Amino acid sequence: MSEPLFLVVRLGSLGDIVHTFPAVSALRESFPYAQIVWLTHPRWKPLVESSSLASEIWTVDTRSFASIRETLKHIRQIPWTASVDYQGLWKSAALPFFGGISKRIGFSSHTIREFGVPILYNERVHATQKHIAAQNGELSIRAGASEDSAPFTLSIPPEAQAATRGILREAQIDRYIVLSPGGGWLSKCWPAERFGALCQKIDTQLGLRCVVNYGPGEESLANTVRANSGKAAPLLYDGGLQELMAILRNALCIVGGDTGPLHLAVAIRTNAVGLFGPTDPDRNGPYPNDASPRGVVSETRPHPATASLKNIVLRSRTAPTTLKRGNQPDPSILELTVEEVFEAVRRCIGAAA
């Protein structure tokens, strides 16, 4: 019997791809000799490559008709066993459909946000798990995987590690904490001014430097953190993805909201303090790279004294859960004080020592 041929579709973005790795790892573990082709946006090809889970990585820019046409041509040339759309959007579901794949696996309308998308699948999975990474695993099981998730390893090129060592050496930084104040929607972001105050406390009370990670269009956000950090002198960093992975791997911990760098840090087993407001950490929170949800401590409810403190989630008990994108920090995330976050960092550092 020939080995299966799977087309995995997850076009973006950073955090969503990270939350797809456990499910694809389960597929790879169940079918070690299968041909798994991962279809993604060109921006995220290095991230998918770092997992070594795909036999091949194809890229497509869904804003380009020429790119879509070329991708569909390639898809039609292969006798696929099945496609698995982990994204659940019209743009991702349409590719296997118009590519003529006979077995197209995706989420049912119970899970998908965009109305009508499941009509493009002929095998629809009604997800029962809460966390999105576990839901992705349910798709892998439908494709034939024996488990819904499996551990994975992300590799960092030596040149990226060398480059970041040089950057840190030049800034005279040895032991450090990464602060990630961005996050796409402002309503789920802890204020940059508070990140600055946190940076100052980390410097004065723990004697540690901070590296502030920021992305395109977030320059003013990073500058606000630095302006409110007193004499702490954080390093503002906006380098490439592979260099960011090297920065995160060597950090004592990361502090950030529901955003890609936080999930990436957890995936490479760096301690994390997650700051959550309107998004539900039970669905979108840190998902430890050990194929299980243990290791996450939510500060919104009591936890056993023996629980692992590797990843700490802070969220107000009164926080409403919504995916509505606001342009101001949600009142629930403003309930998280600088002192409360600093104490979580102190405990997280203690767990790492």
Image (tube, rainbow, N blue to C red):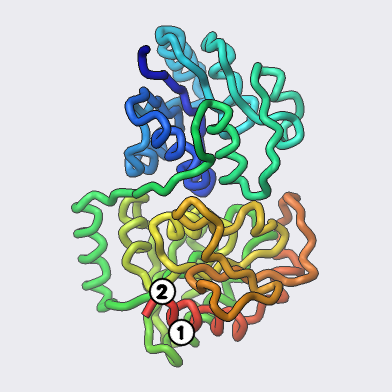
Check disc 1 and report the residue beneath it: 202
Q: Position of residue 222 (x, y in %)?
A: 48, 67
The picture places residue 131, in percent across and down from the top left corner, at 63, 49
Measuring from the top left, give residue 88's x and y in whole percent. 63, 31
Residue positioned 45% across, 45% down in the render: 150
Q: Is residue 253 above or below residue 261?
A: below
The reply, left or right, for residue 11 in relation to residue 2 is: right
For the residues labelled 2 and 1, say whether their Cβ atoms are less than 8 Å apart.
Answer: yes
Which residue does the numbered mark 2 point to in the structure image? 177
**Nearer to me, 321 or 243:** 321
Image quadrant holding the N terminus, namely: top left
Task: Name the secondary structure under disc 1.
Answer: helix
Q: Quadrant of residue 280?
A: bottom right
Q: Is residue 233 above or below residue 159?
A: below
Circle nearer the N terminus (2, 1): 2
**From the viewer's perspective, is 175 left or right of 100?**
left
